[in-house]
Image: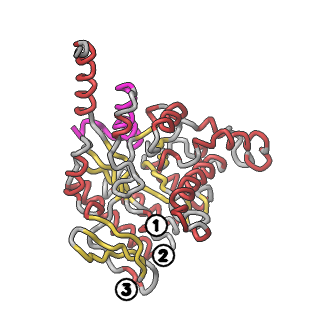
Amino acid sequence: MVGFPRAFVHAISLKFSFLCSMLKIDMHSHILPKNLPRWADKFGYGDFIYLDFHKKNYARMMKGNEFFREIFINCWDPEYRIKEYERFETQVQVVCTIPVLFSYWAKPKDGLEVAQFLNDDIANLQQKYPKNYIALGTLPMQDTEFAVQELERCKTVLNLPGIQIGSNINDINLSDERFFPIYEAAERLGMAIMIHPWNMMGFNSMEKYWLPWLVGMPAETSRAICSLIFSGVLEKFPKLRFCFSHASGSFLSTIGRVEHGFNCRPDLVAIDNPVNPREYLGKFWVDSITHDDKMLNYVLDLQGSNRVCLGTDYPFPLGDLEIGKFISEMGLSEETVDDIFCNSTLSWLNLDKAQFL
């Protein structure tokens, strides 16, 4: 049998060494506190989530009195998660709450209390494991004053680099002017914003076949991006650093249609912002959750590697639970992989790589 040339073996060895030694940051993962209060009992209303630990290492997420989802220990145990991530040579997790805990529907003061509890818990995680966890806060978006108040606390007291908000707030688009003070505060404080789909449009009419997650979520993320672009939010607050989940949902794959609509019906689309939506490509960040190497190459072509971040949606089944394995196997340049695996996330969050080495 003829062996491989030494130069080829050496090149492969260097490539493997590079991939094994580089910093990897998963910028899209979810966690929740193990000990969630029984907020429904305290507040006297609502389908607030609580956990029923029905067997070892498992819990039922209960939404009021109804079963919502069974979760495993990796949803709440930080040390278990670190060990799982070590299997995929991933050192750092950007963690945020599970969207069902947003509780935007709650009374404002109650929503503030929920957000404060979640933020205190996730900030403690970041403080205890500074080399392994970066925490994103959550806000009571149903009340602008409380949201700004909690955003400022996230920055000045909890030392969080950013927040996560939903793709709509109780069916109100993110373009609504009531949210502008929140954007102004985020820009002033230098806080990054992750947009995650939730409260999916058409949920009740398409529950079968998991369609809210397969169809509704991608549409929700595109809804958020289009709302922010067409309303001029990205013009009014040009220093905001947005990152959109699931590789922008369906936005990038339909940018041709979106741009054509902008051009052919400006009387409907361009009424608040005259800038072509294609001009914003590469001005926001997206994660890498495509589950498809051809789609990721397309996303990279539109966005540039410095605006695409490794994301997994860990620990949920729709996520990339092999944490970037398919990216490592795509034959991308070392510079591109390094951008995806850490540089893009660090620039989005405005963090220094040295603090994680």
Q: Position of residue 73 (x, y in %)?
A: 25, 64
**Disc 3 residue type?**
Asp
Q: Earlier in the sequence, mark 1 or mark 3?
A: 3
Q: Quadrant of the N terminus?
A: top left
Q: Is residue 270 above or below residue 182?
A: above
Is the residue marked by circle 1 packed among few (<14), some (14-19), or many (20+) residues within 10 Å? many
Task: Give the residue at x 42% y 55%.
Answer: 318
Q: Are marks 2 and 1 in contact (CB under 8 Å)?
A: yes
Task: Work out how far the residue at label 2 is from the one at label 1, CA to CA, in angstroms.
Answer: 9 Å
Q: Which residue is mark 3?
A: 41
Q: Which residue is mark 1?
A: 140
Task: Work out how far the residue at label 2 is from the one at label 3, CA to CA, in angstroms.
Answer: 13 Å
Q: Position of residue 17 (x, y in %)?
A: 23, 27
Q: Position of residue 62 (x, y in %)?
A: 38, 76
Q: Earlier in the sequence, mark 2 or mark 3?
A: 3
Task: Out of 65 and 98, give the one closest to the viewer.
Answer: 65
Position of residue 267 in the picture relative to residue 189 (left or right): right
**Disc 1 residue type?**
Pro
Residue 116, located in which quarter of the rendered image? bottom left
Task: Give the residue at x 49% y 31%.
Answer: 304
Which element carries disc 2, helix, strand or loop?
Answer: loop
